[in-house]
Structures are given as C-alpha cells and as structure tokens.
Amino acid sequence: MLLRLAVAAFGVLCLSAPSAAAASPRAVTVCSKRATMYETPGGAVVGVVHRGDNVFLLRRGSDGRWWRVRARFGTKGWVRSSVICREDR
C-alpha cells in the first residue's frame, strides 16, 4: 500500500514539474552580415549580432516580422525575422 502511494505521488510530481526542454529557448542562426537588436520593434538600439552568431529565440511577434531573441552575451532584444537563416524560420 505504501509503495503504491509513493509511486502515485511520484507520478503526480512528474506531471506537474515543467520539463527543462520546454523551458529552453531554441537556438537560431543569424544570416545577415550585421543585424541590429532593438529594445522594442523599431525602437532604441540595444545591440548588434553578426552572420553566424547563434541567438536564442524567446518569442515571435504577433505579425511574425519581429523576433525577441537573447544573444550569447546575454543582451535581449528584437530583430527582424528576415535576419535569421531561412532554415531556422
């Protein structure tokens, strides 16, 4: 009986815990020679990334033209989706 309760409790914990893979942002590659990162789409410049740099996709804008990313050096900002390599879009 005690063993059944322990197994059931473990199952509940596994179902309620978020998976690490689901929480991890997907890495995508910059294909433009130089891509500007903005605080908001079209807003103030917060950084620059270059061709071949990996950035991590945090979310896509509602229209799909802007992506919120985190650069490997930690800066978060918005880039145009067109700067991301086609195979990653």
Image (spheres, rainbow, N blue to C red):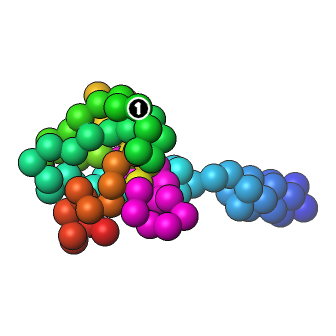
Tell whether position 65 is magenta: yes
Q: Position of residue 62 (x, y in %)?
A: 54, 64
Q: Is residue 66 found left or right of 80 in the rendered image?
A: right
Three-letter amino acid code at the position of disc 1: Ala
Q: Nearer the viewer, residue 32 or 52?
A: 32
Q: Residues within 10 Å of mark 1 (few under 14, many from 20)?
A: few
Q: Is residue 12 found left or right of 70 in the rendered image?
A: right
Whether residue 21 can be seen here = no
Q: Position of residue 38 (x, y in %)?
A: 38, 38
Q: Nearer the viewer, residue 65 or 88?
A: 65
**Which image quadrant for residue 42?**
top left
**Which image quadrant for residue 9?**
bottom right
Q: At 49% across and 67% down in the image, what residue appears?
A: 63
Q: At 48% across and 41% down in the image, what residue appears?
A: 40
Considering the numbered disc 1 on the image, is that residue within a helix, a strand or a loop? loop
Is residue 72 placed above or below 41 in the rendered structure? above
Q: Position of residue 66 (x, y in %)?
A: 41, 56
Whether residue 81 can be seen here = yes
Q: Quadrant of the N terminus?
A: bottom right
Q: Residue furthest right?
A: 1
Tell whether position 85 is magenta: no
Q: Position of residue 4 (x, y in %)?
A: 83, 63
Q: At 41% across and 54% down in the image, what residue appears?
A: 67
> Badge 1 is on which residue?
44
Report how many numbered discs are placed on residues in the image: 1
Q: Which residues are magenta?
A: 56-66
Q: At 31% across and 69% down in the image, what residue appears?
A: 89
